[in-house]
Amino acid sequence: MRTYRFDALTGLDDLHQHEEPVAEPQRGEILLRIQAVSLNYRDIAMPLGRYPSPAKPGLIPTSDAAAEVMEVGEGVTQFRPGDRVIGAFHPRWFGGERPRSFAADSYGSAQDGWLSEYKVVSQEAVVPLPDGLSWEEGSTLPCAAATAWCALAGGTPIRAGQTVLTLGTGGVSIFAVQLAKAVGARVIATTSSADKAERLVALGADEVLNYRELPDWGDAVRELTGGRGVERIVEVGGSSTIGQSLKAVAVDGEVVLVGFLGSEPANIDYFDIQGTYARLRSISVGDRGNLVEAVRAIGESGIRPVIDAVYPFEDAAAAFQHLASGEHVGKVVVRIAAGGS
């Protein structure tokens, strides 16, 4: 089978294709033919030296995929050949506290990921893909959709009439816009260009702020909410945006710490946080149950995942470069099997 590996972690050019044997499923395992893979920021952060946790060189990258079950091992009862599935971002976190193997189970940083033609996993490491979604759409769900769902439905679930703030046009933020609107929330979004602002409005955002034109967008958010602030912020920027997010959050609101896109110093002190009287909740995507709930919510609400570009397997390196450019709106996908549907 063909597969890709980051043979080193010194840059995106370290991604190379390899020819490797197909593994056989053992007891409780399934053999998958991978149809499509979607990229997340972490997939470029590792080779670019921006990832906050240790990462091993030589691994197959990516954590998100949609696949067809080809063979099942002894004792498999949940799936059969021909079933359509998506992988869970955390393959052994089924609920409750994170397992001790949390870091060691991480795709692309501690164990092989999904950018390959075939993969063997435990039957518990995947969930069904609804018939209404294509392979490419399904591949966008394991990280981005589950994270957005956990940010909005976790803690105190967001309710109709409340206001959600999203940052940028990456996969998590776009899903957060769509899911927040599905429950009747008002959405304020930030972005960097008029073109992206138009896309956000088309997806349901009620107001959009250009953070390049309004560097103090936290104050602008307060103005849009009559001085109250927003009940929920899906904070994907990290150190470069947390200061403005703390200005924008309402008393008793919540800032959900999701990402680390920015690298600038935060320049905040304890009283910047304490004085908001808001909650800060740090999440890492979510467990298998969060993914099942997110998939169900997307299916029931008729949400269509937003895909910016689809690259063929042979041009996978170009997909990584496109993601690194920051010009995308939604998800960047690599189609692995020819003739994806």
Image (cartoon, rainbow, N blue to C red):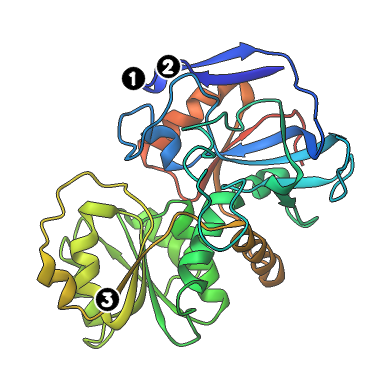
Cα gap from disc 2 to disc 1, whole angstroms:
7 Å
- Vertical comparison of 147 with 113: above or below: below
Query: Which of 73 and 141 lies nearest the eye of the viewer?
Result: 73
SS at mark 3 in the image: strand
Lower sequence index among marks 3 and 1 = 1
Q: Are marks 2 and 1 in contact (CB under 8 Å)?
A: yes
In-image side of 71 versus 44 (left or right) = right
Q: Position of residue 200 (x, y in %)?
A: 44, 62
Which residue is disc 3 drawn over? Answer: 249
Cα gap from disc 3 to disc 1, whole angstroms:
38 Å
Q: Residues within 10 Å of mark 3 (few under 14, many from 20)?
A: many
> Which amino acid, by three-letter code, is at mark 1?
Thr
Identify the image quadrant of residue 336: top right
Which residue is disc 2 drawn over? Answer: 14
Q: Position of residue 55 (x, y in %)?
A: 40, 30
SS at mark 1 in the image: loop
Whether residue 203 appears in this view of the structure is: no
- Vertical comparison of 86 with 310: above or below: below
Query: Which of 25 and 300 lies nearest the eye of the viewer?
Result: 25
Q: Residues within 10 Å of mark 1 (few under 14, many from 20)?
A: some
Cα gap from disc 3 to disc 2, whole angstroms:
41 Å
> Which amino acid, by three-letter code, is at mark 3?
Val
Q: Position of residue 78 (x, y in %)?
A: 84, 51
Which residue is disc 1 drawn over? Answer: 10
The structure residue drawn at horizontal position 37% and vertical position 41%, both measured from the top left corner, is 326
SS at mark 2 in the image: helix
Identify the image quadrant of residue 183: bottom right
Q: Residue furthest front?
A: 100
Lower sequence index among marks 3 and 2 = 2
The structure residue drawn at horizontal position 50% and vertical position 47%, both measured from the top left corner, is 100
The structure residue drawn at horizontal position 61% and vertical position 32%, both measured from the top left corner, is 114
The structure residue drawn at horizontal position 77% and vertical position 57%, both measured from the top left corner, is 132
